[in-house]
Amino acid sequence: MKNRKIIMSFLALSLTTSIVKSQEEFNVEIEPVTITNAPALHSFSWGKTKDNKWVFVGGRIEGLHQRQPNSAFTENFNNKNIFVIDPVTDEVWSTSLSNIPASIYEQLQSTNQQFYQRDSTLYITGGYGYSATQADHVTYKNLTAIDIEGVANAVINNAPLTSFFRQITDVTMGVTGGQLGYLDGVFYLAGGQYFEGRYNPMGPNNGPGFIQAYTDEIRTFKIVDDGTNLSITNYAAQNSTTDLHRRDYNMSPQVFPNGELGFTMFSGVFDPNNLPYLNSVNITTSGYEVNNNFTQYLSQYHSAKIPVYDSTDKAMHTLFFGGLSQYTLDGAGNLVQDDNVPFVKTISKVTRLQDSTMQEVKLNIEMPTLLGAGAEFIPLSDTNIYMHKEILKINKIPNQKTLIGYIVGGIESAAANIFFVNDGTQSSASSQVFKVYINKSNVGVHEVTLKGDNVYNLKLSPNPAKDNVMIDFFVPDNTPISIVIYNILGKQVKTIAVNKEIGQASMQVDVKEFPIGEYIVQIKGSNYSTQKILIKQ
């Protein structure tokens, strides 16, 4: 394996950041490595053998799908192979899936499946792609079980594969772009959609028609599997067209402040205004709860993610690596909104504190390119530092640089916004692999917290002002906001209730009757406040 380390210098890109908590301080570092003949994939499913070999199925071998229906999600860019990779020995094996039964083969070459590995069985539901037997693009209504150990050995030894796959058909499994989690013997199939027909951004009545139906649900069920027979039992669903109408998002395992295990659905697309959701949904065994008291700006689309738990502070961190985002921060730390939801390099962290409040920060490192959408994080199989296979126990990491896993695949884009000009050449599926480290030595503070001045992005012009001042600001959420102006003695001279939709806003305020002098313009909300000095001429 060739190891291309990032050179740290004043002029070089540093792929290191520090996250500081009262009890635990640690750096996050990523280091690109080359795995010879690694597949270029995104939006795929993966499992892992007992000896830490990776098994990849499904996904796409092109970049961002094109807008033109006849060029979008074409069959020739389906991943029709199964890959086995040993990241330590730099070995890659692959074989075509075309010789297994057609119904299994078709589902396993689809994209955006939901998947979870229980013991040595990888369970895959749904996925979207072209079906030769149906002569159309469909969302597969199947649950497929893969014997990871058996199929990996068969691929390595070029042996028959069919006996290592089992499949049943169930309409409730017909989902793409959702997430699959597992807790206390129950599977959680959250969000996603059913899509049938050719993708067409002009809508089903303009050109090739299609059926698109968000599930609007969290579906729970048990998988009964004796190694031969496969069935679904105890099925139930919670529905909300308002809160659960989301897909292509990040769902991450969580430890909540009371010690309860569950998941958080972070952001996702699309809300009634055809924009990303900025709130989150917490899922536990007792149901779900929407968190409208927290706004997530920096990661709206599925990407590599790492849940990190601090048992000392009872703090739950979730790290997000690249992808697509409706917001970025400029050089001054102010939020910049782009409703086209461009590709970004951003690496961010959301923290749930012991009092259940949540904070978001942008780490002072980035992905080296516009990379990360549709990528996956593969943790090490180390129960000393992971709980429930997925949640990193930060208190168990030694005070040194420690490898915790790998980021694999994703879409790499040549520019931030390519959707409206995309002819298939502006992006590609990535074969890049990154080692991810936690380093608890040589730590410092390298993060930008999204609060106050950078959330409201308050600007005054002209300043000094004579007759009128234009107040420009950002409305981050639906909570009440007011603008209050004080004189230099602290006396309130003007209050304005803000009734604006989420996004950039402007208000012109008449100040010609104000005496000459200095004033404080303050914008206040339920979560944040910030202020600037206004000079009246």
Image (spheres, rainbow, N blue to C red):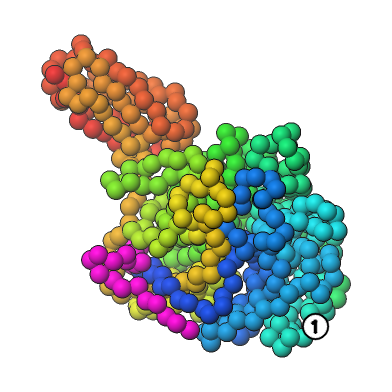
Give the left or right position of residue 184, taking residue 334 as reference. Answer: right
Vertical placement of residue 50 versus 102, above or below: below
Relative placement, left or right, of 272 versus 465 is: right
Residue name at image x 25 percent, y 17 percent: 468
Across and down, in percent, residue 425 comes to 54, 55
Q: Quadrant of residue 495?
A: top left
Task: Say which residue label 1 marks.
Answer: 160
Along the line of sight, which residue is nearer the eye, 20 or 192?
Answer: 192
Magenta includes 296?
A: no
| Residue 24 among those drawn in magenta | yes
Q: Residues within 10 Å of mark 1 (few under 14, many from 20)?
A: few
**Residue occupying the point 35% across, 22% down:** 507
- Which of the two residues, 108 or 436, is positioned nearer the viewer here? 108
Query: Residue 326, how many percent across, how many down?
Result: 47, 44
Q: Residue at x 56, y 78 (%)?
A: 37
Q: Quadrant of residue 94?
A: bottom right
* Residue appearing at x 33%, y 43% in the figure: 334
In the image as oriented, which residue stretches furthest toward the top? 513
Quadrant (top left/top right/bottom left/bottom right) for the C terminus: top left
Evaluate whether residue 37 shows in this view. Answer: yes
- Residue range of the region highlighted in magenta in the rendering: 1-25
